[in-house]
Image (cartoon, helix red, strand yellow):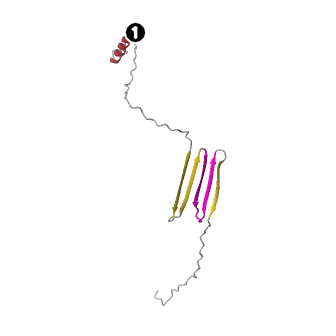
């Protein structure tokens, strides 16, 4: 067995040296592999992401800007496949629109919309028309 390994190693060495180029010496072909760089690395730390984690969260936010009149808020919670929440927005007419919603895999999405406050609409201002004034550009006014 040792003799076969030595014979094969000799054949590979001759082919690598170009002594067996296939120019009338027989058709011996040896494939050359690119050198492989092997580096010793510390074991990589892989974080596993559980894409099937139980969904549960809760959040809320709000804006109350007296300068721009921007008033709105929202809150929402989720526990598994059940989502509950509400949001409130100031409408241009001065009322508040509030939407309470729920969603689940059995009932789908449901929303209840309410309005509170009194709508204020701008009054149309009617101006009194002024009769046109006729200008006389006749003689005696310094215009010729």
Which residue sits at x=47%, y=89%?
141
| Quadrant of the drawing holding the N terminus | top left
Q: Residue furthest right?
A: 107
The answer, for residue 25, to whether it is visible in the render is no
Residue 85 rendering spot, x and y as whole percentages? 59, 52
In this orientation, which residue lies closer to the viewer: 25 or 76? 76
Q: Is residue 32 left or right of residue 64?
A: left
Residue 22 rendering spot, x and y as whole percentages? 37, 15
Label 1 Cα crowd, 10 Å radius (few <14 / some 14-19 / many 20+): few
Which residue sits at x=62%, y=52%?
101
Question: What secondary structure characterizes most of the magenta part?
Answer: strand
**Residue 25, placed above or below residue 115:** above
**Residue 32, placed above or below residue 123:** above
Picture quadrant of residue 30: top left
Which residue sits at x=56%, y=54%?
75
In this orientation, which residue lies closer to the viewer: 54 or 122? 54
Q: Please provide the residue range marked out in magenta.
A: 81-104
Residue that carries the numbered disc 1 in the rendered image: 1
Q: Does the magenta stretch include residue 54?
A: no
In this orientation, which residue lies closer to the viewer: 10 or 43? 43
Which residue sits at x=61%, y=46%?
82
- Secondary structure at badge 1 equals loop
The answer, for residue 108, to whether it is visible in the render is yes
Residue 44 rendering spot, x and y as whole percentages? 42, 33
Q: Does the magenta stretch include residue 103?
A: yes
**Residue 26, placed above or below residue 120:** above
């Amino acid at each position: 067995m040792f003799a076969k390994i030595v014979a094969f190693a000799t054949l590979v060495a001759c082919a690598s040296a170009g002594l067996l180029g296939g120019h009338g010496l027989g058709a011996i072909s040896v494939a050359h592999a690119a050198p492989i760089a092997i580096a010793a690395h510390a074991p990589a730390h892989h974080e596993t992401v559980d894409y099937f984690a139980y969904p549960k969260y809760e959040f809320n936010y709000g804006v109350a800007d007296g300068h721009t009149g921007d008033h709105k808020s929202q809150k929402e919670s989720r526990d598994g496949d059940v989502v509950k929440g509400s949001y409130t927005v100031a409408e241009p007419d001065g009322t508040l629109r509030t939407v309470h919603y729920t969603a689940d895999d059995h009932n789908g999405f449901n929303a209840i919309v309410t309005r509170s406050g009194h709508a204020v609409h701008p009054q149309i201002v009617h101006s009194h028309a002024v009769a046109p004034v006729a200008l006389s550009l006749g003689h005696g006014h310094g215009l010729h």
